[in-house]
Amino acid sequence: MDYDIICTGSGITVLSYVLSLLKKDPTKRVLIIEKHRLVGGYSTCFTRPNQDSILDVSLHKLTGMGKNGNLRKLLESYGMLSELQMVYPDVMFMASTEKGKIHFHHDMSSLIEALKNYCDEDNMLALDDFFSDVMTYGYDSYMQHEILMGNYEPDFKRLRFAHKNLKGITVYDKLKEKFKNSLLREMIAVPCIYVGAFPEQASYLYFLHVWYASFFNRTAYPTSGSQGISDFFRKEIEKLGGTFKLRETVEKIHLSSDGTRCEKIETHKATYTANKFVFNTSHEYVLSLMNQRERECIHLEQDQLPEIANSTTTLYIILNEAPEKLGLTVEEMIILSPDCDMAKSYRDRARANPQDAALNEKAYWELSTIEVTNYHLLAPNHGKVIVINVLDRIEHWPERKTQPYKEKKLRVQSLILKRLIDHFPRVRDAIKYVEVASPKTYKRYTNNTNGSGFGYLVSGKSARIPLKLCDNIQIMSQWVSGGGYEATIAFGHMSSQMEE
Ligand SMILES: Cc1cc2nc3c(=O)[nH]c(=O)nc-3n(C[C@H](O)[C@H](O)[C@H](O)COP(=O)(O)OP(=O)(O)OC[C@H]3O[C@@H](n4cnc5c(N)ncnc54)[C@H](O)[C@@H]3O)c2cc1C
């Protein structure tokens, strides 16, 4: 065999898996094949000619970076925190509503104080109740990695209650049950965006854990951008003898005749053999590298898998003035939906008519809540950059490079910029450069199904997500861990520790 393990793709899950594996057993011969010249997948940065700025493909915040955060502990154990400088924003986000702006602080008393303006007495009680859910069920859920590693023993009665009563209910339904005020509901539901979901799609229990991880366990951003994280992993992996082959695309998988093992993989340059093959991609993508007979051997039907999370449309914007001087005063701003119940009903209709461009554009671009990051406050050396992310679906986007595609990009650009300018008017005259990445761009760049940046939807519906496709093919990506740096890095680490 050429290698013990060959990984296809160098996204963050694989980088974490390989580094902790090689730390545990440096004799393992590991190869990582990556189609780009940079490692990291979504965890990469890029530049544009004459723009003198660095743009981050995805990362705007690492969750779990507080003192007891899972991610902090892991990055410390990798030695990353002594090498990369981190910025720890004081405010989680500033929500911009038609009534004004409200700061969501990391500490609970300031947060409650800020939310009081939107609460009557009933809402205040409901708010206490919600925070109690975050600090109990959200906390237990967040500790799942530690539970699996044998480092934390939960209250099993509480855990059972949560799984029975809170997993199968959506954020939308639960918050509607708790709060009459729809603006309050939409503000509290914002962290759904961090897992590529809308409130009506996400499990309340999963959401509580995201809340705990992001609000009460602090967030951080490396001044090096996400590329710094990926490059750190690459350097450490190479030090321990791991090999990277960049600009090489895996094009074909060859299974044994009985379909139980992968015998080799083929790139456009060479063929490789290994004892084990790890794929940093979706199940669907792995199957697409097999022939029909091989796919049948795997016995994995598409409808057995959970629904795919939303993808993203992104506007990368370079300004000629520091964004904080233009009203974008904190690291993250949320432009809230003007009417969350109407937005939901449009999204329900859009999901039933995924190819209806006008309906989908209205539902996702015009009515839904969107996220704006001020990168200048996070990494000033990277330029006066802001980035806007909008959850979107791939189905209503035409083929890349066609005229309808180009026109659609211009439409999303002008609509989203209008929303930005409505909330932050001083930005209007400072825009120097805008670039749009659509779900199709993300799909082409990472090969993720539908261009999703978060894997499957965390809907709480029971579904079996297979970790292995046959004896020696393992999936190692957001499609098994759940989306986000914390979940993927922790999953990569845990998988290496469970390996013989
Ligand atoms: C816009 C956006 C913003 C986000 N913001 C955040 C955030 O702020 N915080 C957070 O925690 N999470 C965020 N996420 C989610 C997070 O980025 C992802 O969950 C995570 O990076 C996925 O990592 P992965 O290991 O699954 O691999 P991916 O990043 O999907 O990488 C897969 C890799 O495999 C390579 N590859 C695929 N097929 C082949 C092939 N055939 N041959 C060779 N190479 C191949 C690709 O080139 C790619 O490098 C965001 C996602 C998006 C889309």
Image (tube, helix red, strand yellow):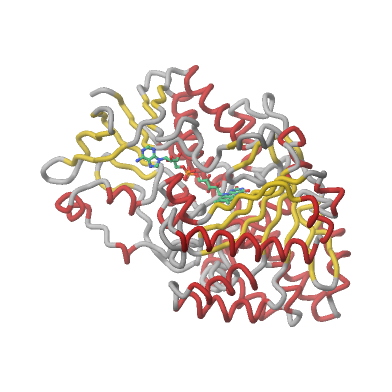
Q: Position of residue 269 (x, y in %)?
A: 28, 28
Image quarter where the C terminus lies is: top left
Query: Above or below — where is 285 with respect to 458?
Result: above
The image quarter containing residue 262 is top left
In the image shown, does 123 or 390 lie closer to the viewer?
A: 390
In the image shown, does 225 or 316 lie closer to the viewer?
A: 316
Q: Position of residue 201 (x, y in %)?
A: 53, 70
Instruction: List the single residue furthest toward the left.
Output: 257
Query: Above or below — where is 136 with respect to 121?
Result: above
Q: Which residue is at a point 61% across and 31% down the rendered structure image? A: 228
The image quarter containing residue 73 is top right
Image quarter where the N terminus lies is: top left
Please give left or right for residue 320 compared with residue 439 in the image.
Answer: right
In the image shown, does 344 or 107 lie closer to the viewer?
A: 344
Query: Above or below — where is 40 with respect to 63?
Result: above
Q: Position of residue 440 (x, y in %)?
A: 46, 55
Q: Which residue is at a point 55% across and 74% down the rendered structure image? A: 169
Please give left or right for residue 450 compared with residue 225 in the image.
Answer: left
The image quarter containing residue 410 is bottom right
Q: Which residue is at a point 63% across and 53% down the rendered structure image? A: 315
Please give left or right for residue 22 compared with residue 156 in the image.
Answer: left
In the image shown, does 452 or 437 lie closer to the viewer?
A: 437
Please give left or right for residue 286 compared with residue 25 in the image.
Answer: left
Q: Which residue is at a point 61% across and 56% down the rendered structure image? A: 194
Q: Position of residue 6 (x, y in %)?
A: 33, 31
Number of marks in the rendered image: 0
Query: Above or below — where is 353 with respect to 44?
Result: below
